[in-house]
Image (cartoon, rainbow, N blue to C red):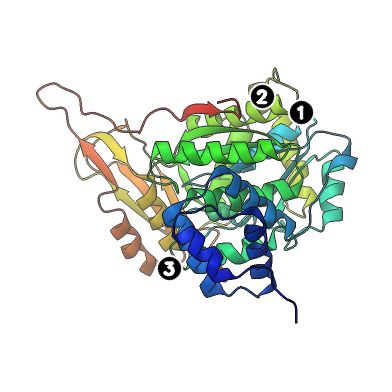
Amino acid sequence: MKIEPFDAVDVIRTKRDGGAVPEPALRWLVDAYTRGFVSDAQMASFAMAVFLRGMVRDEIRVLTDAMISSGERMSFASLGKKTVDKHSTGGVGDKITLPLAPLVASFGVAVPQLSGRGLGHTGGTLDKLESIAGWRAGLSNEEMFAQLAGDVGAVICAAGSGLAPADKKLYALRDVTATVDCIPLIASSIMSKKIAEGTDALVLDGKFGSGAFMKDEDQARELARTMVELGTDSGVATTALLTNMNVPLGLAIGNANEVRESVEVLAGGGPADVRELTVALAREMLALAGQPDADVERALDDGRAMDSWRRMIKAQGGDPDAPLPVAPETHTVTATVAGTVTRMEALPLGVAAWRLGAGRARAEDEVVFSAGIDLHVKPGAVVAVGDPLFTLSATEPARFDRAIEALDGAYAIEQAVDGVAAVVHTGGPLVLERITAQG
Ligand code: URA
């Protein structure tokens, strides 16, 4: 029998009492948990102790590195071009990866975008793309390399099970033990996968607000800073934008409808906020790849980004010209008072779309590609009684009641009082600040 060098109970106790776990003990814990020697109950206690007591920077670095070491490490060095990835901490209507990856690839940079599926109210990039007939999320490492090396240059696909298996196990455990929303655990979880992926550079979209993991701006800033430090310390050029997720991004929330909106952006149109964030993140990615002056707006307007999208979709078996699924049932919510839309909360709209079938409650559930919500207005719009606010789409009308329940209190329409206009709450600018390793 293997003699274990540490005792899980001691490690848990150290963290429970607010101490820093020494590097060899932390590395052992992650390894022993991955091997099945440390039990789920012990690891859940450790995660809760971290949730309550936090971790110092060096512990977060070691935890991340231990999770990377639990699996394979990819390398794109043989590609002969720069690789840049982007990661968003997730939000409602966040389809930015779809236009962003082909846009950046149209400048000759390789974009290896390993993405996930949606769980709960935040959508998943792979679910959205699977609404395109024939499109395939599962690629072998060889297929991924070939796509990045050739004239496509961008890949959006599922991460193989070989990357950071310790995180896969721990994340599933955190999901059922109320230990997800914890900065050291989120930062190490996300960055272990991104660093193991082997990208040269990474741009983080750190979201704050009602539809984000981090509701609070300061916490989102701390999470983004922690991730930027982890990336930089591991030799991945990493920066972050802190962005507003109080209001949904764009007008579409769902899967097929978000693809439709992304294609509008790739055609030089689309909602202003989706275009603004796509452009801001593309500039950031291209700056890290050595092209700080790239004219990304032009690439959206002159068709280069669209050509790149079509190549990327076709390379993964998809038909970019195939009609996207449309739901058989719709229900439009209209304004019952006249005035200005002063508030529209991302979280309840995300929950409503999820209840319509756009998201999944359990990892094994199927999503309904055509289900979702199309917004007709955003905060600041002036509406009359009867004007459409949202159109809900589903495959069964029975889904509408629970979705509408989620919308209760999700928005407000107010009138001017004594000639003073109603105050519109959007939670501030879309891109609040840029975070780099230098501060
Ligand atoms: N996404 C991840 O991959 N890990 C987390 O902990 C949270 C979001």
Q: Could you tell me residue 164's position as x and y percent?
A: 69, 58
Kindly identify which numbered label has been placed on residue 396: 3
In the current view of this chain or complex, which residue is farthest to the top? 293
Q: Residues within 10 Å of mark 2 (few under 14, many from 20)?
A: many
Please give the residue where the numbered disc 2 appears in the rendered image.
296
| SS at mark 3 in the image | loop
Q: Amino acid at mark 2?
A: Val
Please give the residue where the numbered disc 1 appears in the rendered image.
107
Residue under the point 43% across and 41% down: 219
In the current view of this chain or complex, which residue is farthest to the bottom? 1
> In this rendering, does residue 125 appear at all?
no
Give the CA separation, mark 2 to mark 3: 41 Å
Comes first in the chain, label 1 or label 3: 1
Task: Kindly indicate whether the residue at mark 1 contacts the one at mark 2 (C-beta within 8 angstroms).
Answer: yes
Q: Could you tell me residue 198's position as x and y percent?
A: 77, 45
Query: Which quadrant of the view contains residue 76?
Result: top right
Residue 341 located left or right of residue 325: left
Comes first in the chain, label 2 or label 3: 2
Image quadrant occupied by the C terminus: top right
Q: Residues within 10 Å of mark 1 (few under 14, many from 20)?
A: some
Q: Amino acid at mark 3?
A: Glu
Residue sitting nearer the eye, 425 or 239:
239
| SS at mark 2 in the image | helix
Decide: is 120 above or below 197: below
